[in-house]
Image: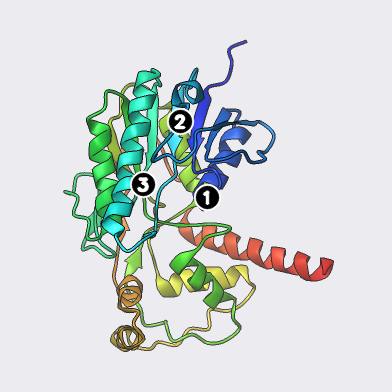
Amino acid sequence: MTAAPLIALTGATGFIGRHLLRDLTGRGYRVRVLLRRPVALPPGASGAVVGDLARPQNMAAALAGVDAVVHSAGLAHAMSGAPEDDYRTFNTEATRGLAQAAAKARVRRFVFLSSIRAQCGPSAPGTLTEADAPAPTDAYGRSKLAAEEALAAVEIDFAALRPVLVYGPGVKGNMAALLALAARPVPLPLGGLRGRRSLVSVETLADAVEAVLRAPGFLRRPLIVAEPDPLTVPEMLAALRAGFGRPPGLMPVPAPLVAAALRLAGRGELGERLAGSLVARAEALAGLGWTAPRGSREGLTALARAVAGGEAAHTTSG
């Protein structure tokens, strides 16, 4: 019997990486987690301690026999007063070094978790596809694009996945804030926001990762990952509140007033995210025969239902 493919996974303790680890082992892949330090791993996964990916050790042994690398580790927020340097070190140079080590180990494919921010800013006109010229607007996006360009210079087949805003259990940042708002039993003055945004659940993202792992031939290109139904913020909140068993409860306050209030509160970019649009289409993945297993409206309702069930279970057990 042929052994299942062996995947080397980075970032397995992060929001996305935890889901990838569970999904890949659940699909029958053997997974070797590349770790900074020894940690307990779930059944079906093994570990290799390589230290900090910016200064890795024992990479030849860690990548021995590996069929593909899934690189989900990276820096999402600056760690010092020099964000450009931090992002370059952890997102660009660490990716370059890992890809070079994978090429030396004759790994078949390198799957890099990039970001839609490698292609655009917090909002964008029209509908984005991989055919659009990348134009990142911040240090994080520039570091992800530079990592993609570094991969293109390494002699290895790669897929640079550019997910849009990712949601799922354990999400942080703006999506966590939206989930918390939806959970509150009060009316919200966000019914007038009309910008549409593409989303992707961690489950859908894991499905896309598996699709590129098994894709035949050579890829060596970026691929947007997005669910097919972009939503407005009111639609997101309505879907979440449906999962909490509540009506939408949204008041139609004009978007400029919401944006002005957020600017006064020092949250101008959040206002742009809420009011602006960022719609993307997964054309390259569709060309591989991939379709999202479900839409964002259904996924958000399922997320809120799971959160509500978890809270109820915690209350009962407490």
For label 2, the residue is 57
- Please, which residue is most extreme toward the left here? 133
Evaluate whether residue 160 shows in this view: no
Given residues 151 and 75, the one toward you in this image is: 75
Q: Residue at x 27, y 23 (%)?
A: 155
Where's residue 55, x and y in %?
Answer: 40, 38
Q: Is residue 237 left or right of residue 290?
A: right
Residue flagged by tag 3: what amino acid is it? Answer: Phe
Q: Position of residue 230 (x, y in %)?
A: 37, 61
Image check: 301 left or right of 157?
right
- Above or below, 101 against 231 in this view is above
Of 123 and 75, which appears nearest the observer? 75
- Is residue 313 shown to the viewer in this render? yes
Please say if 126 is above or below 152.
below
What residue is drawn where x is 30% and y is 78%? 268
Nearest the eye: 34 or 257: 34
Whole-number angstrom distance, CA of label 2 to CA of label 3: 15 Å
Image quadrant where one finds the N terminus: top right
Q: Is residue 273 above or below residue 132?
A: below
Q: Real-space Cα distance between discs 1 and 3?
A: 15 Å
Within 10 Å of the Cα at label 2, are there few (<14), some (14-19), or many (20+) other Cα atoms? Answer: some
> Which disc number belongs to residue 232?
none
List x then y, in percent, for residue 32: 56, 30
| Residue lying at the far right of the rendered structure | 317
The residue identified by callout 1 is 14
Task: Label 3: state its secondary structure.
Answer: helix
Q: Which residue is mark 3?
A: 90
Q: Is residue 91 left or right of residue 42?
A: left
244 relative to 294 in the view: left or right: right
Taking depth in this image into account, of 93 and 121 the one nearest to the observer is 93
